[in-house]
Amino acid sequence: MRILGYLGRANVVLDIPEDQAADPGRIEAALLADKAITHVAQVHCETGTGILNPLPEIATVVAAQGRRLIVDAMSSFGAIPIDVQAMPMDALVAASGKCLEGVPGMGFVIARRNALEAAGKQCHSLAMDLHDQWLYMQKTGQWRFTPPTHVVAALRAAIDQYQADGGQPARLARYAENCATLVSGMRRLGFATFLDDAVQAPIIITFHAPDDPAYDFPEFYRHVREKGFVLYPGKLTTVDTFRVGCIGAIRPDAMRRAVGAIEEALRGMGVQNFAPA
Ligand SMILES: *Cc1c(COP(=O)(O)O)cnc(C)c1O
């Protein structure tokens, strides 16, 4: 919404409660009610909470209404299956970091060729003009501007590793095991996840903050970091939470050690109750 605002593109927001997946039926109703909507922007895995949205069903209703779909698959690409042949969409955006386990720094778009062709001369920005970059790459084999060479080399190595490891199914299986190990360990301590397991993606997990007067996130964060683990602050508007990622070159033993570090850090702070209010 902010991005579109900066670009001066008209938009409407379909508000969805933070603990619920996007509802294809509501998207369909919104499209039926407003014929002026041309495109739907959908995040696949919502990293702010950890929700996995039902992309195949959303792609189906958007296509049935004759609208275009643009997917932010930043935190799912490489781990959660996405079949662009079977799911109608104009473009999918992902990047070198996250589930591909390269270093951050390079984004890429998988686009329907006719949608990319139709985007010619429409871009608000020379630097971000994907169509121009695509034409130039076809003609010269080059990037238009200096490429991030180290990021590209790291991505090449990361993709080799990805393929050697068994590709998407293996990556999803490892993350799912990381997630299950983390969640069961945290629940044993008394923590509660913000999301129901049914909508939780095995990417990043939101936990309710402990209901204990000794709890303080910045201090908790510092103690856990001293033990070698970095947490993410919560991103929710109404409830106090924190997040733990389970992607990257880590295995269940690292998740067990993270749970141990979380427990030690909190006990060291004098937190006794790990359950939410
Ligand atoms: C990480 C992420 C982004 C932003 O990616 P950057 O590499 O920081 O630009 C956008 N959307 C989602 C869903 C993400 O997980």
Image (cartoon, rainbow, N blue to C red):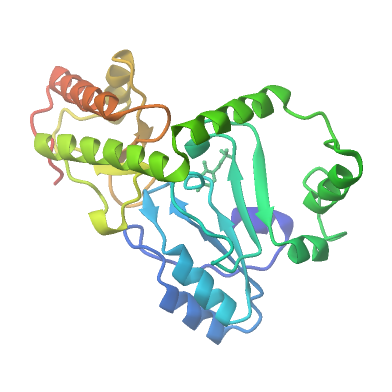
Q: Nearer the viewer, residue 166 or 221?
A: 166
**Can the viewer see residue 240?**
yes
Q: What residue is drawn where x is 51% and y is 74%?
A: 60
Q: What number of labels is visible?
A: 0
Can you say which quadrant of the picture contains the N terminus? bottom right
Which residue is at the far right?
A: 139
Seen from the viewer's position, the closer of residues 268 and 54 is: 54
Residue 9's place in the image compared with 181, above or below, is below
Q: Is residue 195 above or below residue 214?
A: below
Dividing the image into four equal quarters, which quarter contains ligand 1?
A: top right
In the picture, measured across the screen, residue 17 lies left or right of residue 9, that is left
In the figure, residue 103 lies in which quadrant?
A: top right
Percent x, y of residue 201 = 35, 50
Residue 34 relative to residue 117: left or right: left
Residue 196 seen in the current view: no
Residue ID at (17%, 19%): 264
Q: Residue furthest top?
A: 226
Q: Nearer the viewer, residue 75 or 16?
A: 75
Q: Is residue 224 left or right of residue 165?
A: left
- At 53% from the left and 61% from the top, the residue drawn is 42
Residue 116 in picture, x, y percent from top left: 77, 60
Q: Position of residue 187 (x, y in %)?
A: 14, 40
271 left or right, relative to 55 = left
Give residue 208's position: percent from left, percent from top: 23, 43
Q: Quadrant of residue 231?
A: top left
